[in-house]
Amino acid sequence: MSDDAPPAVPPAANDDAGEGGVSKKAAKKAAKEAEKAALKAKKAAEVAEREAAAQGGPDPLADRYGDAPLIQSKEITGKVWTHARDMTAARVNETVTLRGRVHNVRGKGKSAFLILRQQTATVQCVFFVDDVDVSKGMVKWVSKLEAESVIDISGVVAVPSEGPVVSCTQKEVELVVHSVYCVSRSVPRLPFEIDDASRPESDFDKEDGAQYVRVLQDTRLNYRVIDLRTPANQAIFRVQSAVCELFREALRRKDFVEIHTPKLIGGASEGGASVFKLDYMGQPACLAQSPQLYKQMAIEADMDRVFEIGPVFRAENSNTHRHLCEFTGLDMEMTIKEHYSEVLDVLNDLFLHMFDGLNERFKHELEVVNAQHPFEPLKYLNPTLRLTFPEGIKMLQDHGVEGVDPLGDLSTEQERVLGQLVKEKYDTDFYILHKYPLNARPFYTMPCPHDGDYTNSFDIFIRGEEIISGAQRIHDVELLSKRAVECGIEIETIQAYIDAFKYGALPHGGCGVGLERVVMLFLNLGNIRKTSMFPRDPRRLAP
């Protein structure tokens, strides 16, 4: 370096200089840009996560939906379950959990709407993507659930934002979902849609251009487990259960005892050839047509008043709307002091209790049935109308009905016409016809003391169809044996029954009621197969 070179001049001082020579202003700006970049990267990562979830990849809310593990009674969680029918406005803002079936589901963009069905109740469940409770992955998964799959679903009860949900029974509320799990998946293709099976007949008469699928009876019965899921069928069998409940109630109040009699017997319980024969350990036997003989034996065992609800078997090749080869019998038997009208008095009280009970305590079920199968409420009198058989014959003859036999049974058509005449004259769908001809009754029916051509017997009708046959029974051994022979029954096949009256016999009477027929006629359903859970007719032995 030259000695006369000028000295180095230091840089000018800068008050804003920071560490490393960077100004505070520049550092602040860089920090702000870095924060902005980090936020952008975070959002990009979230978008990437959601897109990955939509493609089956990780979803931050994946634990809120999906297929549930197989329920094998592994644990008891204490979880509280709510029934769909209890989803009302009173529960708004409550968090609830339900289990039901996917009735239908539709997804659109970032939302999905699922109708959950539980027996006769339906409720709308809504999903809106918010990335807090519901992700796009959840909406996509829910939208692909098969109809009839069983799900567990939880959420908050809310008032529908767009007004009442007219397509559901629970119109005032909906469920805002935060978790849903599939307990059991249905196969993708059903034999028929529940909506089609639930359609009222009147829909097919509408001239709105809509094309509806009619589910025929055989298809319904072939896939009965699906058909029974319709709201109307759910209600029908709750009505059937109610009939049994009310039958028991009415008779227990009158000191009746419920009994259970054999269904495997060594002879025909009512005579004739309409029995299902079988081999019983090398002995000829048959399925009981009725508990009749055993009910009477119970009376002679001093049971005084008995009833039974149990299966009855009839090997009759009758392919009609009102006959089954197996049905449920509601039977009763009781001692009488003087007259078989004592039995009619009990039956009067029994059926008034049953009809009143159905109308008052099972209104919801009746309304559900009526929505698909409209019917006029049953008309009945208190006390119940009673007509003698000759009076019924005269009404038919006066109306010009031909082929009426005063000493024979009524045909199905004659019963129907008589029911119409009774309704027109007395304004009732329910009545008792008594004093039937001897030729139209079983061997154990007590003959009328005033006219040997008739008996102390009766039938009871609903809407022109018979639901009950009953009578005073013969309790005299000699007369009983005589009548059995006259009816072609071999005495040895019913000897144990006859012997029951040798040791002092109480006068008695009773009847048998067909449960399925009562329900069919009360609801005016038109076919008994609708009131038999798994009907057995001459052509059907499965499912």
Image (spheres, rainbow, N blue to C red):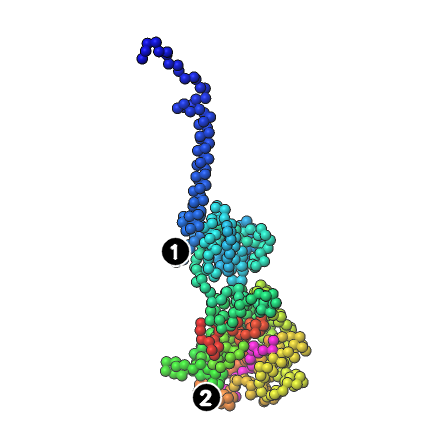
292 inside magenta stretch: no
The residue lying furthest to the top in this view is 4
Nearest to the observer: residue 357 or residue 371: 371
Q: On the image, numbered disc 1 is attached to which residue?
A: 74
Tell me, yes or no, if residue 14 can be seen here.
yes
- Image point (58%, 72%), residue name: 524
Q: Residue at x 44, y 36 (%)?
A: 37
The answer to whether residue 32 is above or below residue 6 is: below
Q: Residue drawn 60% across and 78% down?
A: 464
What residue type is disc 1 on?
Lys
| Label 2 sits on residue | 490
Check disc 1 and report its element: helix, strand or loop.
loop
Query: x, y (%) of residue 385?
Result: 64, 77
Front one among 517 and 469: 517
- The stretch of residues the image draws in magenta is 463-479
Residue 36's spot in the image, x, y percent?
Answer: 46, 35
Instruction: Indicate whether 130 appears above or below 270.
Output: above
Q: Nearer the viewer, mark 2 or mark 1?
A: 1
Query: At label 2, which amino acid type do we have?
Result: Glu
Q: Is residue 144 left or right of residue 169?
A: left
x and y, in percent, of residue 207 in the image: 61, 67
Q: Which label number is shown at residue 1?
A: none
